Image (cartoon, rainbow, N blue to C red):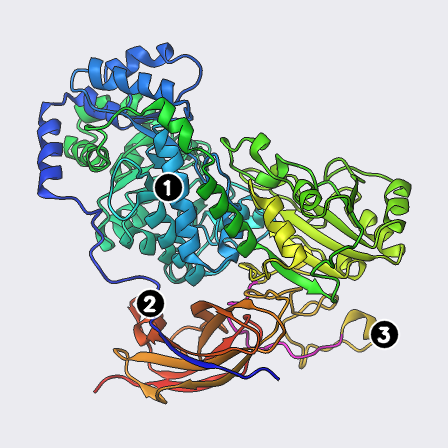
Amino acid sequence: MKCTKIFILALLVVASCVREEATSVGTTPEVEARVDGLLKQMTLAEKIGQMNQVSVGGDVANYADAVVKGRIGSILNEADPAKINAFQRLAVEESRLGIPLLVGRDVIHGFHTVFPIPLGLAATFDPALVEEGARVAAVEASAQGIRWTFSPMLDIARDPRWGRIAEGSGEDTYLDCRMAEAMVRGYQGAVLDSTSMAACVKHFAGYGAAEGGRDYNSTFITERQLRNDYLPPFEAAIRAGALTLMTSFNDNDGVPSTGNDFLVRQVLRDEWGFDGLVVTDWNSMGEMVPHGFAADNKDAAEKAVGVSVDMDMMTFGYLSHLEELVRSGAVKESLIDDAVRRILRVKVMLGLFEHPYVDVEAAAAVQYAPEHLAAACRTAEESAILLKNDGVLPLKDGARILVTGPMADAPYEQLGTWCFDGDRTHTVTPLKALQERFPGKVSYVQGLRYTRQKRDRFDDVVSAARRADVVVAFLGEESILSGEAHSLADLNLKGSQSSLLAALHATGKSVVAVVMAGRPLTIEQDLPHCGALLYAFHPGTMGGPALSRLLTGEVNPSGKTPVTFLRTVGQVPLYYNHHMTGRPYKNETLLDDMDLEPGQTSLGNTSYYLDYGAYPLFPFGYGLSYTRFAYSGISLDREVYTPSDTLSVSFTLTNTGEREGTEVAQVYVRDLVGSVTRPVKELKAFRRVSLQPGESQLLTVQIPVSDLAFYGLDMVKKVEPGEFRLWVAGDSASGDPLSFEVRAAR
Ligand code: NOJ
């Protein structure tokens, strides 16, 4: 037996979801003086020009007149550094006031070096690593003149049909807060300099709750749900210094975000004190017309400026109508001044006036730098989740491996959604990585050319499998099957992928499935057909080496599910932190066990599906390792706290297996009785811990009691005294609870 070492490690986990500090974007008197100085010199038309953002493409000359006349304040969709320089030259050297353009782009999960999709980033539960990745993206993109990224996306998503679930951190508010802060810090840097990209937190707000999972759809989120679940990540990002924010496409309870006074004016500006730039989503101002909330673009512009939306992305509503609205007295010029002040502030703070141009050659040199690729590889390693393993993994040295499946050698598809700049020729696929790792031992039969392909027979793959010792099937989704406007009603593996896996299983050989997808797919029917299943959300440029290292055991899987994995799509929405019903589920009779002609009764029946019960396939926070972990000695420093105290949770985590590994220890809390019903569990802290075989660590996690505050019946955020339960475990469905009490301070 290995001797158990005990390490005492006091971890001060800053568990608070939202830090209580000033929310200003960090301006200085010098910045303000410069902004005011410029504002005084501007004509009304020049001010309105700053509020106009244009998607450019093709010849710079096409936009020269508008830029020189000061009718464009920001551009998007141009990434060529030479062209960006040309745009800036027009703005800085030829426009009357020489105000540089703010160049924006969707740099969502890396720029040239592509990192895992954001859902995969969340699966790492490693904010420091995610921050490093965002820094890499900022260094690469800023070198080419892109100083504003439309990221991070902070939309809580509890419906995997929604294609944009790929772009966020999943279903949990606390995890989303931590990822939000990390990305903002990474993009903007510790101090703003020429490598900083302004972060743009989006989509404000509630967009992820699109009804039916259909993109752009209406949402019906109550104010309490908004405040408790959907808004905290935005507030956390803003307190971390996010310079800008984007309004969303959806209407919530009938009010589109771009004209939503409650969201933008009341919560964002007045309650949070956000003085950063607010931009619309693409034409979301104009879309208030088809929504039936504005009569025409003029009405939409008046509504948007009225709630303090500063910049119009691609409606041209401000450009076309604001001047007239001001002249007629419908819109006060002070509203325009406020908006322009917020836009200029960002430009000044980013140093664009001093450094409007980039060095094109130097820019090329930083793309795909070895340290960037290494960071992308580490992130892909940490983001993969081991969902099943009967012992077939890690792969044994010397084994003859058959690699198959549509995602094995798909350099474009593994990059995932939203990667305009990732060049597939730099992608390293799993096939290439495994061939390099096991020279002469890897054979390859594709089986299916793409994930949607249908085939009746797999004779070629099956006979190749018979000649191999182990089969690794790379399945999943092409990148186009997730992301904006790409929702799905059926979440099973597409095409004939499940049949391919079943055919491989029927050979009797050991089969490993690796799924690369943009969402949690419903893979229950596939699990019996593989000995191991590794789930990699689209892993990016370095997905191949990362997956190869995980399969061989050079790296031990440590990712955890950032979202509940469903057994069937009919369970949507099913998420771990739901509220308790009056009839909590107990093991009920399922369809197959029912008598014929049973008498109808509702007595005793609980909240579940007759055919699928009440549980998911894998709960939130779940993921296996090649080793095992045990939790012991879980304790709290006290039994009773006041709202101003801090909980000190101690526990010992032991690696009881045979190899080094990393566990994500999670702390969940339940408030038993409230002025309104509370979730059955809520994540309040997590910690990644690496342990040698046999090693133990005593961990102490501190959670301010104020983190248990919520918006109750009176819609005031506070901690409600009473009984609580607390769990420490490796996922959201495990562990035995401790009890504690919060009493009002006397
Ligand atoms: C629409 C998307 O909703 C948004 O996320 C993106 O940033 C903009 N288009 C700009 O491309």
Of the 4 image quadrants, the one containing the C terminus is bottom left
Q: 10 Å neighbourhood of mark 3: few (<14), some, or many (≥20)? A: few
Look at the image and tell me whether residue 296 can be seen.
no
Q: Residue at x 64, y 61 (%)?
A: 386
Q: Secondary structure at mark 1?
A: strand
440 within the magenta span = no
Q: 10 Å neighbourhood of mark 2: few (<14), some, or many (≥20)? A: some
Q: Is residue 369 left or right of residue 244?
A: right
As drawn, the residue found furthest toward the bottom would be: 639
Q: Secondary structure at mark 2?
A: loop
Asked whether the beta carbons under mark 2 and mark 1 sit within 8 Å of each other, the answer is no
Q: In the image, is residue 537 above or below residue 680?
A: above
Look at the image and tell me whether residue 613 can be seen.
yes
Of the 4 image quadrants, the one containing the N terminus is bottom right
Q: Which amino acid does the dot numbered 2 rest on?
A: Val
* Label 1 vs 3, first from the N-terminus: 1
Q: Residue at x 59, y 55 (%)?
A: 384
Q: Label 3, on which residue?
A: 597
Q: Label 2, on which residue?
A: 14
Q: Label 1, on which residue?
A: 247
Q: Which amino acid does the dot numbered 3 rest on?
A: Glu
Indicate the position of residue 12 as horizontal and vertical percent values: 33, 71
